């Protein structure tokens, strides 16, 4: 063996050793850094065990990357939904802003209730009244115009309790979970009862989820050429309510593939969790965020007006769903500035 | 300098040289290999010029990767649509298969026309008759069952002229275009007038387009728990027709972002091309596949029953859309086995 050959052999060995060391160090670091805002409880362990199982090549539980679809409810799962859904706060603000062009509203319910700040009368208007408010404030403009209205509002509005923009009241542990799943080859989708065009304008910046991976409730739109300008006009008609039994319907319609993981927090997510986790030949994962932290956020479940968690909680353990106890499982609720 | 140091220096230099050579060779090869089934005509030049423009960082025409959305019609744009839409051939075959469970069909139009192979009576049934055939053959089963029916049919059916599976009658130049766009950071979507659940089962294998990037016409589905098994039942009701003015509506609803490139072949794609290319601050690209090759495929436009190209052809040059002349622009129509 010549000195050069010998040197080559030694160099190769050193290089391989260095690479192995680096890899080990990176793995250890990744381990430590996985979901840092989650306490070391059963919830985190269940998430990590599932992800490691489906990403382990050669294992019978391995799921190819294209099939790693994860679906997330938004209100109460990714961001705060109390004291009322953010989109409802938006609709009420819009009624106040639009009132000057609608003098008749000061004598017409449910608009009068909003303008008088009469929450009792508003509650009495029921779901029908709320729908009327939503349609009146969410239609009659182009989709481009609505995007601007929603974007401007979300930038300026403040949550009444925390006095912060709503987009800062997203859950830090869930942001980490979204990132952890994506780092493991998952495609993350939002499947929200909220309006899709209300969520899309900020979902990419806040959650890293592009508009084409946001599914939600829709109102009808109509295409027309205004001179040379193609326009989509938002009509005052509900197209689809993406809640409860609507969620599996929308998942199938938009994604066309059964998710392998679903994350929700209320009975509105029950059918999505069933559709995702029951049946199918590969491992599945279901998780419910249980709001148990009155101090750092809110504590609510069975009697709540927003994000009611009842039936889904009853069947969670039967179905093997992980129930996150926010107070015990999360080190931190919201992102630091 | 020791011999080892010297050797290291020389090795490093050689390695860098080799890497540079390899890179140059790969680039040259990529250049030669771009769209190999396209002749060196204006159509190919327009495609390449657009892609180079929007991917050149620092240029005023640069479009960030997340915004590089390209939408493709399917019938007549990605695969053959003559002598009839493939999905219609599927529906007719399904009527023949299902007839034994529907003895009443032999005396009821439009089913009788199909069973008698009476194309004149079928044509007389018009759009209403076709819709009736589609609903009768595409509903009444679960979405999982329908996927299996569609998958089995597409594997066994043969085109009457070319005697080949329909999935081999996709256009090789368009497959290359899909790959070229994706290699340049585009996300490719199908926006088809056809049923989304008819296209999805094979689109990933044939076009490299995953189900969540296939948009199409839909029928209503209903979620139900059959015992412990969550099921989506296909109902005999049209949900949405993804054609003409429906295409921009669906693009906005599913993708939520204006595409920067659209590819179609008929008046059914006019509004999608308008929505994509007219307005918007970044460069846009529109392309129409004009069927001009009676020998290798078909030649048709203004008077065709399937894939009629009339209005869209009239406005193509005004709007700066590229019109592909299949005969002149494409070296090869279908993939080689």
Image: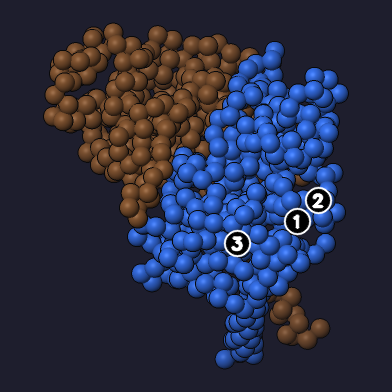
Chain colours: A brown, B blue
Question: Contact, CB < 8 Å: mark 3 with mark 1?
Answer: no
Query: In the image, what residue occupies the spot 58% across and 13% down?
Result: A315
Point out residue A128 in the picture as x, y percentages from the top left corner: 35, 15
Taking the image as drawn, is residue A238 in sight? yes
In the picture, the quarter occupied by the C terminus of chain B is bottom right
In this rendering, position of residue A290 left or right of residue A283:
left
> Mark 2 near mark 1, Cβ–Cβ under 8 Å?
yes
Q: Could you say where residue A327 lies in the image, as x and y percent from the top left? A: 41, 22
Q: Chain of mark 3?
A: B
Q: Nearer the viewer, residue A189 or B175?
A: B175
- The residue under the point 75% across, 80% down is A6
Image position of A161 (left or right of B304): left
What residue would you read off at disc 3?
B289
Label 2 element class: loop
* Quadrant where the N terminus of chain B is found in the figure: bottom right
Mark 2 or 1: in front is 2
Work out whether B75 lies above or below A59: below
Above or below, comparing residue B224 to residue B161 in the picture: above
Instruction: Give whichever of B22, B38 is nearer the camera.
Output: B38
Residue placed most toward the observer, A85 or B47: B47
Q: Where A28 falls versus A196 (above or below)?
A: below
How many C-alpha atoms fall within 10 Å of the one at disc 3: few (<14), some, or many (≥20)? some
**Which residue is painted at 79% across and 29% down in the image?**
B112
Have a look at marks 3 and 1 and say if they share a chain: yes
Q: Chain of mark 1?
A: B
Q: Position of residue A284 (x, y in %)?
A: 65, 30
User: Between marks 3 and 1, how big is the CA–CA gap?
Assistant: 15 Å
User: What residue is pinned by disc 1?
Assistant: B169
User: Do tag 3 and tag 2 residues touch (Cβ < 8 Å)?
Assistant: no
Residue B159 badge: 2
Mark with earlier residue (3, 1): 1
């Amino acid at each position: 063996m010549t000195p050069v050959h010998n040197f080559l052999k030694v160099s190769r060995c050193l290089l391989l050793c260095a690479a192995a060391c680096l890899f080990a160090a990176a793995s250890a670091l990744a381990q430590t850094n996985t979901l840092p805002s989650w306490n070391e409880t059963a919830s985190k362990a269940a998430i990590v065990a599932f992800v490691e199982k489906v990403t382990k090549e050669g294992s019978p539980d391995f799921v190819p990357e294209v099939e790693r679809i994860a679906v997330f409810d938004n209100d109460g799962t990714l961001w705060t939904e109390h004291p009322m859904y953010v989109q409802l706060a938006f609709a009420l603000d819009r009624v106040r802003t639009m009132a000057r062009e609608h003098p008749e509203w000061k004598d017409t319910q449910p608009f009068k209730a909003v303008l008088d700040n009469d929450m009792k009368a508003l509650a009495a208007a029921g779901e029908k009244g709320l729908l009327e408010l939503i349609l009146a404030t969410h239609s009659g403009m182009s989709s481009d115009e609505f995007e601007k209205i929603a974007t401007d509002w979300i930038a300026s509005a403040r949550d009444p309790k925390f006095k912060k923009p709503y987009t800062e009241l997203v859950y830090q542990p869930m942001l980490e979970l979204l990132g952890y799943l994506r780092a493991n080859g998952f495609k993350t989708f939002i499947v929200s009862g909220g309006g899709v065009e209300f969520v899309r304008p900020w979902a990419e910046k806040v959650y890293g989820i592009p508009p084409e991976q946001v599914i939600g409730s829709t109102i009808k739109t109509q295409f027309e050429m205004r001179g040379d300008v193609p326009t989509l006009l938002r009509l005052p008609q509900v197209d689809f309510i993406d809640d409860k039994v609507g969620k599996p319907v929308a998942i199938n319609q938009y994604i066309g593939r059964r998710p392998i993981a679903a994350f929700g927090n209320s009975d509105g997510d029950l059918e999505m969790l069933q559709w995702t986790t029951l049946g199918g030949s590969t491992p599945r994962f279901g998780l419910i965020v249980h709001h148990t932290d009155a101090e750092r956020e809110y504590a609510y479940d069975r009697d709540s007006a927003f994000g009611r968690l009842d039936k889904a909680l009853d069947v969670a353990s039967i179905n093997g769903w992980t129930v996150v106890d926010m107070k015990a499982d999360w080190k931190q609720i919201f992102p630091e500035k």
